[in-house]
Image (cartoon, rainbow, N blue to C red):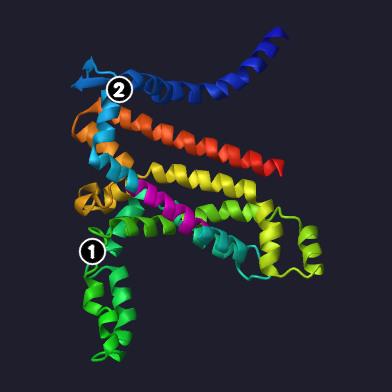
């Protein structure tokens, strides 16, 4: 009997053990080792010299670090203020019971998640090409009738020509908008699933009561639906910000040299990678990584405070 009890008691640990071993080897140990590494100047993979906070100061004095940080913040802003409203709109649309083929539309909107970031980056690098890229060809076809309509008139200077549309340098000078649009295609359906799950838990009784009181669709959404889905919305915002600050695969695959022309698509993680593995300064890369961790911790604390204030209301 005691042997059986012992085996039952060990069973959960056997299931947890593979994850625990992998977590310790590939996450915990590198995380601990990165602390002294960020305080050192490295000479190859083994030799290092302690320099204190010099690497952190070097990052703050490096203009390229601030370019990477600015681009990452802009990308995160695009994710929050463009991507999430689109996801919420899709969720509101697919939450309608009378919509025919809701399951098919859910699969279609979520399907970009199934292809992977590298494949999406390769596909986007083709779609956003000059001259023969699908995006530029579609824009050229859209502006052509308008340009012909105003040809020779005063408005001609305001309407770009199809030739100008075909020459749009998305992967060079317009790298950041290209990244935001690609991420919109990738993650709008993914975040839609969170919003859709939250919308399905909104009280029907409250919505019907608001309707009987004369509230229109906008007022019902603002005063009933939005407060009900606020915890999920705050979580999705935090998830989007963290994912945006970890952006690496898309620019590395899509853009020339992984950064675009004049660092237009340089992100903080790409800068970390190039500093550590291409320039060979592992201490500097570790310092950038810890600065990124501090920024993300600040967002997590802000999300916690917002959630707590929402719960107290």
Say above or below: 193 vs 46: below
N-terminal-most mark, 2 or 1: 2
Say above or below: 274 vs 169: above
| Residue 206 in the image, given as x and y percentages of width and height | 78, 58
Of the 4 image quadrants, the one containing the N terminus is: top right
Q: Residue at x 60, y 42 (%)?
A: 306
- Residue 276 visible, this orientation: yes
> Element type at marker 2?
loop
Give the quarter of the image for residue 26. Answer: top left
- Say which of marks 2 and 1 sits in front: 2
| Residue 183 in the image, given as x and y percentages of width and height | 40, 55
Q: Which residue is the site of mark 1?
A: 169
In depth, the one of 184 and 225 nearer the eye is 225
The answer to if 74 sits in the magenta stretch is yes
Q: Residue at x 24, y 59 (%)?
A: 173
| Residue 30 in the image, given as x and y percentages of width and height | 37, 23
Magenta residues, as a range? 71-84
Q: Which residue is the site of mark 2?
A: 53
> Element type at marker 1?
loop
Q: Residue at x 26, y 26 (%)?
A: 55
Give the left or right position of residue 101, taking residue 47 as reference.
right
Crowdedness near tag 1: few (<14), some (14–19) or many (≥20) residues, C-alpha within 10 Å: some
Asked if the residue at tag 1 contacts the one at tag 2, i.e. Cβ–Cβ closer than 8 Å, the answer is no
Q: Residue at x 21, y 77 (%)?
A: 163
Give the left or right position of residue 66, taking residue 193 as reference.
left
């Amino acid at each position: 009997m005691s042997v059986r009890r012992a085996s039952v008691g060990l069973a959960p640990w056997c299931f947890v053990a593979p994850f625990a071993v992998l977590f310790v080897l590939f996450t915990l140990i590198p995380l601990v080792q990165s602390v002294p590494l960020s305080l050192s100047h490295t000479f190859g993979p083994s030799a290092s010299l302690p320099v204190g906070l010099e690497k952190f100061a070097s990052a703050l004095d490096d203009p390229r670090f601030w370019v990477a940080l600015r681009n990452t913040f802009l990308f995160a802003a695009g994710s929050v203020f463009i991507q999430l409203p689109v996801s919420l709109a899709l969720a509101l649309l697919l939450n309608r019971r009378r919509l025919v083929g809701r399951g098919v539309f859910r699969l279609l909107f979520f399907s970009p998640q199934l292809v992977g970031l590298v494949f999406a980056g390769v596909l986007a690098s083709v779609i956003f090409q000059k001259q023969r890229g699908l995006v530029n060809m579609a824009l050229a076809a859209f502006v052509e009738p308008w340009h012909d309509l105003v040809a020779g008139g005063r408005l001609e200077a305001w309407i770009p020509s199809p030739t100008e549309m075909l020459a749009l340098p998305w992967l060079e000078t317009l790298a950041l908008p290209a990244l935001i649009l690609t991420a919109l295609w990738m993650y709008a359906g993914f975040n839609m699933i969170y919003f859709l799950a939250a919308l399905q838990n909104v009280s029907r009784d409250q919505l019907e009561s608001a309707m009987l009181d004369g509230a229109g669709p906008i007022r019902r959404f603002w005063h009933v639906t939005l407060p009900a889905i606020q915890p999920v919305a705050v979580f999705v915002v935090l998830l989007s910000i963290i994912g945006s600050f970890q952006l690496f695969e898309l620019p590395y695959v899509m853009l020339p040299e992984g950064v675009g022309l004049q660092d237009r698509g340089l992100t903080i993680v790409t800068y970390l990678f190039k500093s550590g593995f291409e320039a060979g300064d592992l201490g500097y890369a570790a310092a950038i990584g810890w600065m990124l961790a501090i920024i993300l911790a600040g967002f997590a604390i802000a999300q916690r405070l917002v959630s707590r204030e929402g719960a107290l209301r």
